[in-house]
Image (cartoon, rainbow, N blue to C red):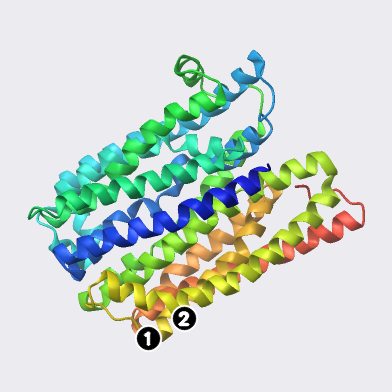
């Protein structure tokens, strides 16, 4: 059974359950602390989405590297796996330490209020809250590369079960917490605590699946560079820039709304985002498999066959995106009414805008995943840098004109103009160059 099929089956099994537990958790907590307080909780819970670059760009080399190390049980292969994983952990350790430093700075400065905007007043002491949040986030960040290793190693379905475990653990802890009268800050810490716990367990599971030991990891961890792959650090740095710009474009909207508009406009937008982000994350959990899947196909059947295979996958993904967008527009208002106990209403225009954004993400993500050569990553980084520079001023302007709707309109505009359209033309150039027998572009 192929990795792609395994991922589809695993996502089919885990996605409904994960969505169910996430929805029930939101319903429980909203009933306990109210929609406004829960909107503020979601702002804090969503902070890690702004920080995917904390792995310092190791996604590309880890996924590509482990896709080439799937077979073989020799000592040299195991050493290469340990070397590659240690490279990712070494870079993430830098970010983990930085998070702890930032957490301490928040404890002794007014940074917490700046980050949470107008919603900071809903927490008793946002400084202490963000400090503990930073400690837990540093653990998850340190161990984050293990999930990328599993994806490249053809074990992406394990990451899906790990994510389901986080949702279940979060629900169970919140279920116990609602039996008591607690500060809303507690509910903001539960998801990141669950994530850190599952990541620790996942680290040891990953080592077992890769056939390596903690002793090997520690031995390789002390080295300062990968001695046998000179391009890894270069690709990692490009991926670092890409993830930084993508986080700003895709996940900073709630914080711009919180900082720019009256507090009463926040719940509707945040609840819509609460439905949109898990839905989109569930899809990316499957689509990320295109990366090693197409790469392995190229190794077995050649570049031309791999490109034809990708075109078929991309077409299917776009069709699925149309249905997903329509389903979002229909179901999101119903789910939000349930989650908020009828306390939050969303308008059709903003809901439809989120649905259209979901379709655009379906269309652009596979192409971005395909363009993972050094040239492809450099191309994406340049366009996304321009998009990120445009996004904040454009969105702030649209917020003043359209209210909360302006935030999603800003994301749509930048995603179209600086991701989907340029990536599509880059991909088309690749097809033409392959047909002409040129090697100007490589997978």
Tell me the distance, in whole angstroms, between the alpha carbons under discs 1 and 2. Answer: 18 Å
Determine if residue 421 is in view: yes
Element under disc 1: helix
The residue drawn where x is 68% and y is 52% is 371
Q: Which mark is residue 352?
A: 2
Q: Is residue 309 left or right of residue 256?
A: right
Q: Quadrant of residue 269?
A: bottom left
Give the residue number, with chain letter if any, for mark 1: 401
Position of 201 relative to 345 (above/below): above
Query: How many neighbours does mark 2 have within 10 angstroms: few (below 14), some (14-19), or many (20 or more)?
Result: some
Image coordinates of residue 344 in percent, x first then y, are: 25, 77
| Front residue of 22 and 109 | 22
Q: Position of residue 323 (x, y in %)?
A: 57, 73
Residue 419 in sight from this viewpoint: no
In the displayed structure, does residue 3 sit left or right of residue 344? right
Residue 40 at what x, y percent from top left?
A: 22, 63
Look at the numbered disc 2 and give the secondary structure of its residue: helix
Marks 1,2: beta carbons within 8 A: no
320 horizontally vs 298: left or right = left
């Amino acid at each position: 059974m192929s990795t792609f099929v395994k991922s589809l089956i695993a996502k089919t099994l885990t996605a409904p359950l994960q969505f169910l537990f996430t929805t029930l958790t939101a319903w429980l907590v909203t009933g306990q602390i109210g929609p406004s307080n829960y909107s503020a909780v979601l702002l804090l819970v969503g902070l890690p989405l702004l920080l995917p670059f904390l792995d310092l760009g190791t996604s590309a080399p880890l996924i590509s590297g482990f896709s080439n190390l799937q077979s073989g049980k020799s000592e040299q292969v195991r050493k290469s796996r340990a070397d590659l994983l240690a490279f990712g952990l070494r870079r993430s350790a830098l970010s983990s330490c930085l998070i702890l430093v930032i957490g301490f700075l928040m404890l002794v400065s007014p940074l917490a209020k700046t980050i949470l905007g107008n919603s900071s007043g809903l927490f008793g002491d946002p400084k202490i809250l963000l400090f503990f949040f930073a400690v837990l986030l540093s653990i998850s960040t340190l161990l984050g590369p293990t999930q990328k290793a599993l994806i490249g190693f053809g074990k992406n379905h394990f990451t899906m079960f790990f994510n389901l475990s986080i949702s279940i653990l979060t629900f169970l802890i919140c279920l116990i917490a609602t039996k008591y009268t607690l500060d809303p800050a507690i509910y903001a810490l539960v998801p990141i605590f669950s994530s850190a716990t599952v990541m620790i367990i996942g680290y040891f599971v990953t080592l077992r699946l890769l056939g390596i030991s903690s002793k090997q990891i520690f031995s390789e961890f002390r080295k300062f560079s990968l001695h046998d792959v000179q391009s890894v650090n270069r690709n990692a740095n490009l991926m670092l820039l890409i993830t930084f710009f993508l986080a700003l474009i895709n996940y900073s909207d709630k914080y711009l709304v919180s900082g720019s508009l009256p507090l009463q406009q926040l719940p509707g937008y945040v609840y819509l985002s609460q439905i949109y982000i898990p839905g989109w994350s569930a899809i990316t959990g499957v689509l990320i498999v295109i990366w090693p899947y197409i790469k392995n196909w190229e190794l077995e059947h050649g570049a031309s066959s791999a490109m034809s295979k990708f075109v078929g996958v991309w077409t299917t993904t776009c069709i699925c995106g149309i249905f997903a967008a329509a389903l979002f527009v229909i179901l999101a208002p119903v789910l939000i009414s349930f989650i908020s106990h009828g306390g939050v209403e969303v308008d059709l225009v903003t809901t439809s805008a989120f649905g259209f954004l979901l379709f655009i993400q379906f269309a652009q993500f596979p192409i971005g995943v395909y363009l993972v050569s050094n040239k492809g990553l450099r191309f994406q980084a340049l366009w996304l840098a321009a998009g990120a520079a445009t996004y904040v001023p454009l969105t702030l302007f649209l917020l003043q004109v359209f209210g909360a709707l302006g935030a999603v309109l800003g994301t749509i505009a930048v995603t179209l103009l600086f991701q989907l359209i340029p990536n599509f033309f880059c991909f088309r150039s690749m097809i033409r160059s392959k047909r002409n027998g040129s090697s100007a572009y490589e997978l």
